[in-house]
């Protein structure tokens, strides 16, 4: 049973209005059609709907164009790194994009750079109330949710001798538990949309990793959380298929130019050097050369590579529950 929130109501109105953009405003707007409770038939052809005690749902034509025209998307962890690059591509392809991140000032600057059709939302992806609020904010701002990209993630390398249980649990919370929370609350809005328009297809895409497909030496906290994510993807896909919600993972290779790897203090190059993951490596450059040489297409994975895989998931209507490598051939599926 889905609890009726302002956001869920907005999502239903949007579907009934023919997938327009629906924005909740305070008070009663002039000329708004007054409705006591949701009635799909009565929404058709209306420009604004007023519900006493809630406010006015303004219904407008979507702007832009592109492969994701009129899609409403959230990308968690999109203030920087892969998430930022993914959000930029989705936005350029016409999507309405929510830049959702723990780092709100940075998220705000990304949303500002994107301009129209982008908003920033502060979220802690590992906190249930915060995730619920992010989904609600998205739905009342744009009128629903079509694509949830679960991208926020952290990596803490370390072997069995040095890994602390607190660090292990933090990685598990942000990379694994957070995916469950994101799927739980995003699917609630999507199910409400399905109720009004059962033919409409929606997507949850988890940004996983090649470390979710193959073990990672002295990096088990991360690899374990990502392997677990694929189990969630397969299971969510089975559970959500009756609602026309597809669920897939994309599994990028290493983004060497991004902060996760290249941050001079906390980046993985430095962490791996200190953890002794690369035998004989004496400098960050040694670690870099070692990793680049592993991929048959000799370069790192970049955000547009990942965004293309996500768009494939959205456009492909006959696939769900998959984990798609984006690794330049480093990981090949059996
Ligand atoms: N960088 C790589 O080489 C690589 C490779 C494969 C997969 N991935 C995956 O891609 C995703 C993004 O990685 P990245 O390299 O861009 O990371 P990043 O560290 O550059 O960026 C992560 C973003 O997530 C945000 N974030 C962190 N914790 C959060 C939380 N609790 N709630 C909300 N936001 C939070 C950060 O503020 C940051 O903006 C992760 O899931 C990661 O596991 C990365």
Image (spheres, rainbow, N blue to C red):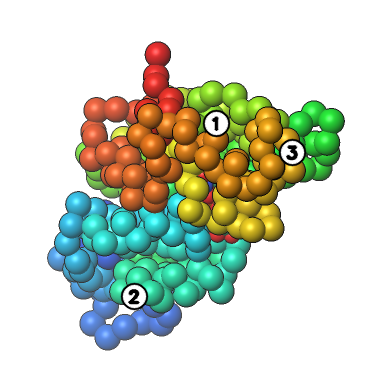
- In-image side of 203 versus 239 (left or right): left
Residue drawn at x 74%, y 43% is 274
Q: How many marks?
A: 3
Locate residue 310 relative to residue 172 in the image: left or right: left
User: In the depicted view, which residue is nearer to us: 296 or 283?
Assistant: 283
Residue 283 visible in the picture:
yes
How would you rate the neighbour count of disc 2 (Cα within 10 Å): few for under 14, some for 14-19, many for 20 or more?
few
**Residue that numbered label 1 is attached to:** 211
| Residue for badge 2 | 115
The answer to whether any part of residue 131 appears in the image is no
Residue 211, picture quadrant? top right
**Residue at disc 3, CB closer than 8 Å to ligand 1:** no
Q: Residue at x 26, y 62 (%)?
A: 92
**Residue at x 20% of width, y 68% of height:** 63
For this view, does 93 lie left or right of residue 285? left
Please tell me whether residue 239 is drawn above or below residue 37 in the rendered image: above
Residue behind label 1 places its C-beta within 8 angstroms of ligand 1: yes
Q: Earlier in the sequence, mark 2 or mark 1?
A: 2
Tell me, yes or no, whether the two marked residues, 2 and 1, touch with CB atoms within 8 Å: no
Numbered disc 3: secondary structure: helix
Crowd class of label 1 (few under 14; some 14 to 19; many from 20; radius 10 Å):
many
Most foreground residue, 99 or 299: 299
Q: Is residue 124 left or right of 206 when viewed as pictured?
A: right
* Secondary element at tag 2: loop
State the quadrant of the C terminus.
top left
Q: Give the Cα separation between the discs numbered 2 and 3.
A: 42 Å
Dot 1 falls on a residue whose secondary structure is: helix
């Amino acid at each position: 049973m889905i609890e009726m929130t302002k956001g869920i109501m907005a999502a239903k109105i949007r579907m009934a209005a023919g997938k327009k953009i629906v924005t909740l405003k305070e008070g009663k707007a002039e000329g708004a059609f007054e409705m006591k409770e949701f009635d799909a038939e009565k929404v058709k052809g209306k420009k604004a709907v007023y519900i006493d005690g809630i406010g006015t749902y303004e219904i407008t034509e979507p702007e832009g164009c592109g492969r994701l025209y009129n899609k409403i998307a959230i990308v968690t962890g999109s203030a920087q790194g892969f998430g930022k690059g993914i959000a930029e591509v989705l936005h350029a392809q016409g999507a309405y994009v929510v830049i959702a991140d723990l780092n709100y000032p940075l998220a705000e600057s990304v949303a500002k750079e994107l301009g129209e059709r982008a908003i920033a939302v502060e979220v802690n992806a590992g906190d249930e109330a915060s995730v619920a609020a992010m989904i609600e904010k998205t739905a009342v701002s744009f009128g629903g949710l079509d694509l949830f990209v679960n991208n926020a993630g952290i990596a803490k390398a370390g072997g069995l001798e040095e890994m602390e249980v607190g660090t292990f649990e933090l990685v598990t919370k942000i990379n694994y538990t957070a995916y469950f929370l994101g799927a739980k609350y995003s699917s609630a809005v999507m199910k409400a949309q399905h109720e009004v328009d059962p033919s409409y297809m929606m997507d949850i895409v988890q940004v996983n990793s090649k470390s979710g497909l193959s073990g990672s030496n002295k990096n088990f906290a991360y690899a374990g959380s990502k392997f677990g994510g694929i189990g969630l993807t397969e299971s969510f896909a089975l559970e959500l298929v009756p609602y026309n919600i597809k669920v897939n993972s994309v599994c990028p290779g290493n983004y060497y130019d991004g902060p996760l790897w290249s941050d001079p203090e906390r980046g993985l190059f430095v962490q791996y050097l200190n953890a002794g993951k690369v035998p004989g490596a004496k400098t960050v450059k040694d670690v870099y050369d070692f990793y680049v040489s592993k991929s048959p297409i000799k370069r790192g994975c970049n955000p547009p590579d990942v965004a293309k895989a996500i768009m494939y998931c959205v456009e492909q209507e006959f696939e769900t529950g998959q984990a798609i490598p984006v690794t330049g051939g480093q990981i090949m599926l059996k």
